[in-house]
Structure formats: C-alpha cells, structure tokens
Image (cartoon, rainbow, N blue to C red):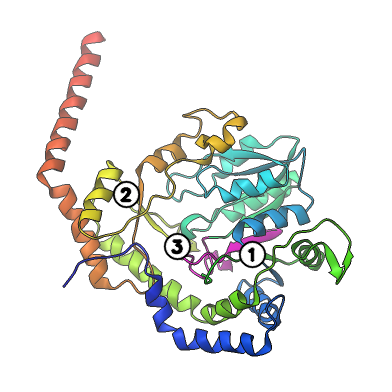
Amino acid sequence: MSSRVPFVDLAAQQTAIAWELSEALDDVASRSDWILGRDLELFETEFADYCESLYAVGVDSGLSALELALRALDVGAGDEVITATNTFVATVFAIAHVDATPVLVDVDPKTYTLDPDAVGRAITKRTRAIVPVHLYGQPADMDSLSEIARSHGLLVIEDACQAHGARYKGQRVGSMGDAAAFSFYPTKNLGAHGDGGMVVTRSRALRDRLRVLRNYGQQRKNHHVEVGFNRRLDTLQAAILRVKLRHLDAWNKARRAVASLYDELLPEQVIKPTAASDVEPVWHLYPIQVERRDRLAAFLEQKGIGTGVHYPLPVHRQAAFKGLGYEAGSHPIAEAACRRLLSLPIYPELTPASVRVVSASIHDFFESPGHRRRRVEDARRVAIRRELRTAVE
C-alpha cells in the first residue's frame, strides 16, 4: 500500500458530500439568481448565527472582508493599525489599501498570535485599530487585546480567516470585535469552490454600510451614495458554503483528533504547536518548529508526504513593505518561527494510519545517519565556541 500523504486533499471532502452540493447548485440554477440571490441571504444569516453574532455580509475574498471592514469603520489615511508580522500578507494589504499605516509587532512564542505586550508598546496617538490574527486556527488573547483597545479607544477587527468555528473562553471567534473577517478560500476549514469571504459584526449600521460598499456604493439599484466596489459573494458559492457549514463542527472535531494524535506520536526533537487551556482551536494548520526545516521537508517529500511553510518571510521582511523601515532582527520571535515552522498534513479526512506514517517518517529523519552525524558536528562546534570564550575570558 502506498504511503503517500498529500498536504491537503480537497477531493476527499468533495466526494463525501457530492450529492448535497449537486442538489444545492441545481436549486440555484433553477432560480438563476446568480448575484445577491436567496442562498447568499440565507448563508449570511446562518453564518452570523454560527458565529454567535448578529449580522454577516458576504464578499468575494478574505482580503476584501478585511479591507471593507476597515473602510466601513472609517479607518484611513493618517491612521495606524497594529497587527502581527507573521500573518498571510493579505492582512497587511487590507490596511495599506485603505491608506492607513500598518504597524507590525511580534508574537507570542507558544501560540504565534499577537503579543499583547508588544501591542501596548506600539500604540501612539495615531493608532486607530488592532487586528488580532487567529493564526492557524488558534484564537488570539482577546481578553488582553480587548482591554488594551478599550483603554485607548481603539477598534478591534478580528482576522478570523483561518479560524472558522474556533472558541476563546467559550465564545466563537468573530463575535468579540467591532467586526471580523473570514476567508472561504478552498483550503480553509470552511472553503468554497473558489474565492469568497465574509464580514461578521454586531452593528446593524456597519452591516448596512458594508452592503453598500460591496455593491457599487448603491443603497438601491442605480442610486449610488458613495464610491463603492464590486466585491460580492456569488450565490453559487454561498449555496456551496451553506451545505458545508452543516458539516463544519464535525470537520473541526476531526481536525482536533488529528492534532491530538500528532501530539502523541511526534518525536521530542520537534516543538509541537501549543494551545492555551481556555481556547478551542480548529487547527487549520498544524505547524511544528524544527531545526533544518527545509531538510525535513525534502526528506518527507521523498517519502510522498506533503508539507507547507506558513510563512517563509514575516511581513516586515517582505519587499512590498520595505518602506515601513523595519530591520532584520526587529521581530525576533516571528523571524525565528518563520525559519523553523513546517506545516504537516491536517484535514478532516486524514486517517490515523496516515498520521502514523507522517509521524514515523519524522522519527526516521531524526534517526537517520546523516542527521546523527550533523548533530555530533553541531555539538562539537558548540564545544569549540565554549572553549574559545573560556580562553578569551
């Protein structure tokens, strides 16, 4: 039997619910309400309820969700927005797109989410908002961040693009800020058959403005009250997402089971992801920290095991943001993590047998003669440096 384990397997999910999806798509086709149709309205209501919030507005991507949330809250030129530097670049693009200044800070070394102390140090008179990123499906420290925001009169926009269904102290992510953004990119825990996104909020006024912004700035047809965009979530994608939403809790439970098995089986040489005791992560990704990350990835690839790197460069080291003026070493925790993190396969259909194959292969890597030889050489180099320091002293 082949031991091939893909990093993701979207076909497995598609096969399991194919008849439900076909029925939903046929229903849309029979009505032909392709834009702002019935299934979009229903999905917005259902997703807001799922997030334990009041309103949801479907848009065309997670980036649009973040950008339009900022625009609808009147964040713009002259404002600073604080967020984590080890996020997918779309988080920071959204801030730049509204002409605000991204302020990038370091992260907690265990959860890789926004460090509240670093946020506190970064606040200035120009700070307008904080964007906590629930990275890898792990909720950020929302109590601390919300308290900082309250004490300084700041907005909070949750980037929940990787955390559909996660809970923080019993609350769903997406229900704790002024607004929250979700992505429905196909590989997400709740993924469409293309791009898609959603803004969730408890504010009816914010919902109403988001609806105007996403649809050419019009309150009703041909009556344009402000300069808007074409950022709507297609009815077909909404119909697909309605079907998948019914399965999301079960899929997240399966992801947690995979993560628990990795926790049990992986060797001591890797640093496993850590979840705080008061959160319920949904493990969009399962990133381990390991020395010689790229060598391990190549070793696993030779065995037919897919992996991912999320992300090889923190945002402050990306060429697109060199104008912000951050230097190498300015965010040491994020920079070290970006050099060492490797995402292992994790998805609801991943079998325990496949998890064992991945874990056993990682054991093999650390027990290989080449790795043992490099470990001895590293120990010798450390001993030599120690002797040199002693001699100088």
Judge from the rendering whether residue 236 lies leftward or rightward of residue 76; answer left or right. left
Quadrant placement of the C terminus: top left
For the record, the magenta segment spans 162-190
Q: Secondary structure at mark 1?
A: loop
Crowding near pointer 1: few (<14 within 10 Å), some, many (20+)?
Answer: many
* Residue type marked 1: Asp
Query: As drawn, is 352 to the left or to the right of 237?
Result: left
In the rendered image, residue 334 lying in the magenta stretch gets the answer: no
Q: Nearer the viewer, residue 33 or 333?
A: 33
Tell me what residue is drawn at x 57 percent, y 84 percent.
25
Who comes first in sequence, dot 3 or dot 1? 1
Task: Measure the alpha-carbon separation of dots 2 and 1.
Answer: 36 Å
Q: Let me know if residue 168 is in the magenta part.
A: yes
Looking at the picture, tell me which residue is in the foreground, 273 or 312.
312
Name the residue: 75% across, 40% down.
79
Q: Which residue is mark 2?
A: 271
x, y percent for residue 72: 77, 56
Name the mark nearer the viewer: 2 or 1. 1
Foreground tag (2 vs 3): 3
Out of 26 and 53, give the one closest to the viewer: 26
Where residue 221 sits: x, y (%)? 86, 72
- Residue 148 seen anywhere in this rendered image of the structure: no
Q: Are dots 2 and 3 in contact, CB under 8 Å?
A: no
Residue that carries the numbered disc 3 in the rendered image = 284
* Residue 316 percent location from the top left of the image: 54, 36
Image location (x, y in percent) of residue 172:
58, 68
- Which amino acid is tagged 3? His
Earlier residue among tags 2 and 3: 2
Disc 2 marks a residue whose amino acid type is Ile
Q: Kindly identify which residue carries mark 1.
A: 60
